[in-house]
Amino acid sequence: MIVISDHGKGMESPSESKGAGLGLSIVDLLLKRMELEWRTDSSPQGTSIVIGQAPERNLNKI
């Protein structure tokens, strides 16, 4: 498990800098290809992104 965190104002706080909105989509795509999953926890006290192994898939199931 990897945890990345900061102590910023959180993801929901207003910001003057706007991106194209592709960053987290790219992260999601890459992590899925590596069979990893991620979640974010964000509040006015900061944001944490937790990356870990996805639950094992049973490929024998029909």
Image: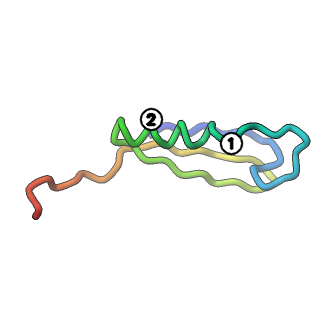
Residue 33 picture location, percent across and down = 36, 37
Kindly give the residue lying farthest to the right in the view shown.
16
Q: Residues within 10 Å of mark 1 (few under 14, many from 20)?
A: few
Q: Quadrant of the C terminus?
A: bottom left
Left or right of 47, for residue 44: right
Residue placed most toward the observer, 60 or 56 = 60
Residue 58 picture location, percent across and down = 16, 55
Q: Quadrant of the N terminus?
A: top left
Residue 54 picture location, percent across and down = 35, 49
Residue type at numbered disc 1: Gly
Residue 19 picture location, percent across and down = 76, 37
Mark 1 lies on a secondary structure that is: loop
Q: Nearer the viewer, mark 1 or mark 2?
A: 1
Q: Determine the residue positioned at 86% across, 37% down.
A: 17
- Residue of label 2: 30
Mark 2 lies on a secondary structure that is: helix
- In the picture, the disc for residue 21 is 1
Left or right of 38, for residue 6: right
Q: Determine the residue positioned at 63% across, 39% down.
A: 22
Left or right of 42, for residue 54: left
Question: Which of pointers 1 and 2 lies earlier in the amino acid sequence?
Answer: 1
Q: Residues within 10 Å of mark 2 (few under 14, many from 20)?
A: few
Left or right of 62, for residue 9: right
Q: Determine the residue positioned at 88% across, 51% down.
A: 14
Tell me where residue 6 sits by quadrant: top right
Asked if residue 2 is positioned above or below residue 57 in the image, the reply reads: above
Q: Determine the residue positioned at 75% across, 50% down.
A: 11
